[in-house]
Amino acid sequence: MPAIRRIRFVHIVQYLVLAGLMLALVLVADHRVQTIDNKQNTTSLIALLLVLVVLVMGGIYLVFRRIRPNLRRPEAENLRIYQSAVLLRNSFLALVSLPPLLLYHLTNEWINLLFFGVLLVALCVLTLPTERKYRRWLLT
């Protein structure tokens, strides 16, 4: 099924883009915080970031739960809706890998950065869209 291959390609590209974006933001924030060198400012920045992540994850989850298939729709429309569900799920799951990245920001230990990469790769592989998963989603 060529549509599933296209969705799979978008899935992989989305994880790469999200990983690059999160890594770039943390590295830029790391550079900025080191120039400021204020512990209180760092703590408030991390607290604000955690609140923002929780709000974004909640919004993504609410929208994700509203996306439902309908067997009466044309297959092309159901595929578009499935791709939207996959993109939202990927965005939600990519935020799960943010804590190791924040630990790297605080400790500057490369093992946390490695864990961030391994976690994203594992999530990408485990949630790879297949035709079987699409059919199961269609019947829910």
Image (cartoon, rainbow, N blue to C red):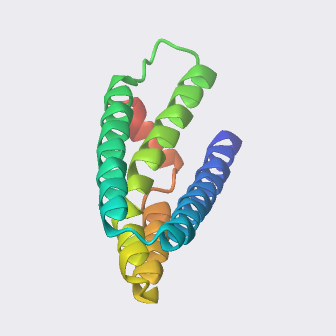
Write the residue at 57% across / 30% down.
79
Q: Describe residue 77's horizontal placement relative to residue 41 as left or right.
A: right
As drawn, 112 above or below 81: below
Residue 40's spot in the image, x, y percent?
Answer: 30, 63
Write the residue at 46% across / 35% down.
85
Residue 123's spot in the image, x, y percent?
Answer: 43, 63
Residue 37's spot in the image, x, y percent?
Answer: 44, 72
Depth check: give the residue in front, 138 or 27: 27
Depth check: give the residue in front, 86 or 28: 28
Quadrant, the C terminus: top left
As drawn, 127 above or below 51: below
As drawn, 21 above or below 69: below
Total numbered badges shown on the rendered structure: 0
Write the residue at 31% across / 54% down.
44
Write the residue at 49% across / 65% down.
125
Depth check: give the residue in front, 42 or 17: 42
Determine which quarter of the picture holds residue 116.
bottom left
Residue at the far top: name it.
72
Depth check: give the residue in front, 37 or 100: 37
Quadrant, the N terminus: top right
Q: Describe residue 43's horizontal placement relative to residue 13 as left or right.
A: left
As drawn, 35 above or below 3: below
